[in-house]
Amino acid sequence: MKISDAIPYLMLIASIPSILMSLSIDTTRLNIIWWSIFAFFLWMVMRYKKYFFTENSLPLLIQLFLGMTLFQIIHGLFLAQGYWDYKILVRNLFTFALPLSILVFCSPLLLSKTLHVWFRYATIAFFVILPLMNAHAVGMYWVPVMFMLLFLSALPKGQQVFLIMLLVMVFIFSSLTARSAMIKYSVALLLGLSVYTEMYRLKGLLRIIHRGLMIVPFVFLILGLTGVFNVFKLDEYASGLSKVNVAVGDGEVKEGTLTADTRTMLYVENFTSAIKHNYIWKGHSLARGHESALFRDIDLYGRGERPASEVSILNIFTYYGIFGVLVYFGIFYMASYKAMMLSNNKYIRVLGVFVAFRWVYAWVEDFSNFDLNYLLLWIMIGMCYSSTFRSMSNSEFRLWVRGILWQRKLQLR
């Protein structure tokens, strides 16, 4: 198979395991198949990077993060106590190797064709597998729509209508209790619409937005630790939303709690575990999780450990320690800064704001899995770092993004 035929299908291949995990069927015995798919994905990236990667090297901070990943893999080999720990180690190895995807998907032509292939087949497949999907799976399935919403103003009317229809479909088939998907899609849409304003011409305003988004998680963390204000206890400030009737994916109406605090205890457990087992700075390796009173029964070794949590930054903290959190922060900081302050077009500036938002949201949820959500996050980070994308003019970027949903047959060189 030619490179031009194989590479654009990598995103579809990477989508399969994440979609299967979200279906209302038992897929717990498919680990070997998933790992084979992951390994093939990464092999293709490394094998063909020379055709598509035009930068001098990966950004230094991403290289450092990958180096820390290698260290935590070796660290995990010493801390693993049996089969289940090694299973977690392998899963995390593939997940945190996803930054390597930048090596191919920073090519504008390749990324355009890859997303085009995804939309062509995923739109048809959605209606086939919809009866098997739960309400939370729908938002995870249409992650590329979230990406495209950022550039809504650059698209012709027909493509705008198509994307809005897909967005409405996400909201209809999802549940309001799937708060994460609703928040991320809504933010992407608002940022896409914000391009109609003149805010992206104002470098001073962008600088304030950038610094604010990068710092705000630390501010809320300090406020929470000192007992001044807990941002997760919104039910104390917005009691009117604490209990509402919501429609779940199967059409049934149930009572939901939109402001329920499901995060404070996770932070307490992760911090307490790190202090108790002395891995605050160096991390607990990619093979071990955090001690949890809520999920202690799932640990078959009797240690009371949970391998991962719903909060992305807590996983980084557990696996890599504070040093890893700082490097992770640096990656998001520099990516969003380059996009917002050093870009020739307003669309990459919008992307930079969204990447900065995803840094904030990593403190709320954003699962760290080998799936479409995490893959596309690293693709967006790569675009922010890419001198090719940042050097495009507004008209050049419009031509590029319009080719995603409709394009002639392209020859990748």
Image (spheres, rainbow, N blue to C red):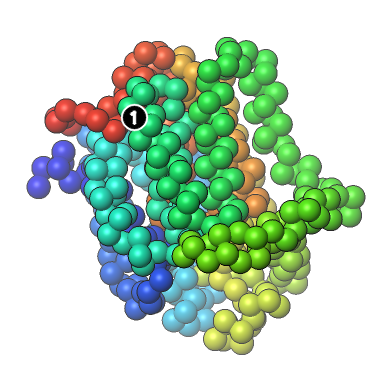
At a point 53% along the width and 18% down the height, the residue shown is: 196
Q: Nearer the viewer, residue 378 or 99?
A: 378
* Residue 395 drawn at (x, y percent): 37, 13
* Residue 135 drawn at (x, y percent): 48, 61
Q: Which residue is mark 1?
A: 159
Asked if one can make out residue 47 in the rendered structure from this viewpoint, the answer is no
Tell me the quarter of the picture where residue 16 sits: bottom left
Q: Nearer the viewer, residue 3 or 330?
A: 3
Say whether residue 240 is left or right of residue 104.
right
Residue 223 sits above or below residue 197 on the image = below
* Residue 235 drawn at (x, y percent): 79, 56
Secondary element under disc 1, as helix, strand or loop, is: helix
Residue 294 sits above or below residue 104 on the image = below
Tell me the quarter of the picture where residue 138 sits: bottom left
Q: Amino acid at mark 1?
A: Gln
Quarter containing the C terminus: top left
Say whether residue 267 is left or right of residue 301.
right
At a point 57% along the width and 16% down the height, the residue shown is: 197
At a point 65% along the width and 28% down the height, the residue shown is: 210
Residue 269 sits above or below residue 371 on the image = below
At a point 39% along the width and 36% down the height, the residue shown is: 163
Asked if one can make out residue 191 in the rendered structure from this viewpoint, the answer is yes
Label 1, residues with CA under 10 Å away: few <14, some 14-19, many ≥20: some
Say whether residue 177 is left or right of residue 71.
right
Tell me the quarter of the picture where residue 52 sits: top left
